[in-house]
Image (tube, rainbow, N blue to C red):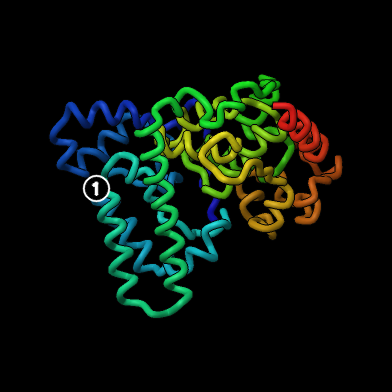
Amino acid sequence: MNLLGSFEQDKVVFQFKDIDNKLKENKTINSSDSVLEKFIKNIKFPGLNICPCRPGENAAQTLLKNFINEKKIYSYNSARDFPSYNGTSFLSASLRFGTISIRKVWNATLNLNSDFANQENYLSIETWQKELVWREFYQHCLFNFPELEKGPYRKKWDHFPWQNNNEWFQHWSNGDTGVPIVDAAMRQLNSTGWMHNRCRMIVASFLVKDLICNWQMGEKKFMETLVDGDLAANNGGWQWSASSGMDPKPLRIFNPYTQAKKFDPICEYIKYWIPELSKVSNSELLNGEISNLEKNNYSSPIVNHNIQQRLFKSLYAEI
């Protein structure tokens, strides 16, 4: 990884909604990537160089081509969950804004399936296909159940006693919870307008199951900040994390420290986004036991995961 810098959140958010309106009004932009690039520069988006998603049809085609030609699609199954790896396609925003079609992406995977007999390659292609299917599933869910936009699919969640501590929410939103993997992910979001998918699940679980804040608070934050913010996918992902959606598993809770040990074992991702912790030993970062001498003004954890997990479970048992 190359640390390219960080930016204040209010200066970074890529205003795709504004761009979307401009695209509808300007036929030249629709047909010219060069004009689109100029338009993006004119709105002064400071995170452009570090956001992995790229605007425009030609850029989307290049992202897909690179994902295949650089053989990332053949290692996707083993690499996709590690946020420090360059292991995903970065096509989420392109799909969100239609600069590439889901059919074109899907057909590209079918062509590969016919050309490669290697079992590991096939498994990785199939895993990526399943992720595309998840996206379509959430599109169909929202189309057939538009009420999902307003609240939980599982109605008993209407009665959950959320604590909605606004101070805790602000710490979470700013990447200042004292839990390294959570803070690294939120800083990535605030600096680039994008977040690795594994990290989206980790921070969502932490907000809902540790801080006991309504999932809709996080859903709103993501839609305000993500360059690939898609109503259906975002809503579906948050309801999946909150256990309030169309999911056969009634309850899942991610331990952020266990997740970090599994998916950022040498703390490359954590230290990239939290440079003040770059000199701290990996074992301390992964266990959440950073000594005061090494904190370098980094916050202590605002909650204890084990205590909050027990509290959440007790509240859940009563609804």
Q: Quadrant of residue 268?
A: bottom right
The C terminus lies in quadrant: top right
Q: Give left or right: position of 273 versus 117.
A: right
Q: Nearer the viewer, residue 207 or 289?
A: 207
Residue nearest the observer in this picture, 126 or 186? 126
Residue at (39, 28) in percent of width and height = 146
Look at the image and tell me whether residue 187 can be seen. Answer: yes
Q: Is residue 300 visible?
A: no
Q: Secondary structure at mark 1?
A: helix
Amino acid, disc 1: Glu
Residue in the image at 58% along x and 44% along y? 201
Q: In the image, residue 256 lies at what x, y percent?
A: 70, 45
Residue ID for mark 1: 57
Q: Position of residue 192 (x, y in %)?
A: 48, 40
Expressed as whole percent of the image width and height from the top left, the position of residue 29 reads: 18, 36
Residue at image coords 26%, 49%: 101
Q: Is residue 33 left or right of residue 280?
A: left
- Name the residue at 53% across, 54% down: 2
- Above/below status of 177 relative to 108: above
Position of 281 compared to 14: left or right? right
Of 105 and 169, the residue lying toward us? 105
Rate crowding at label 1 as few (under 14), some (14 to 19) or many (20 or more) other CA atoms within 10 Å. Answer: some
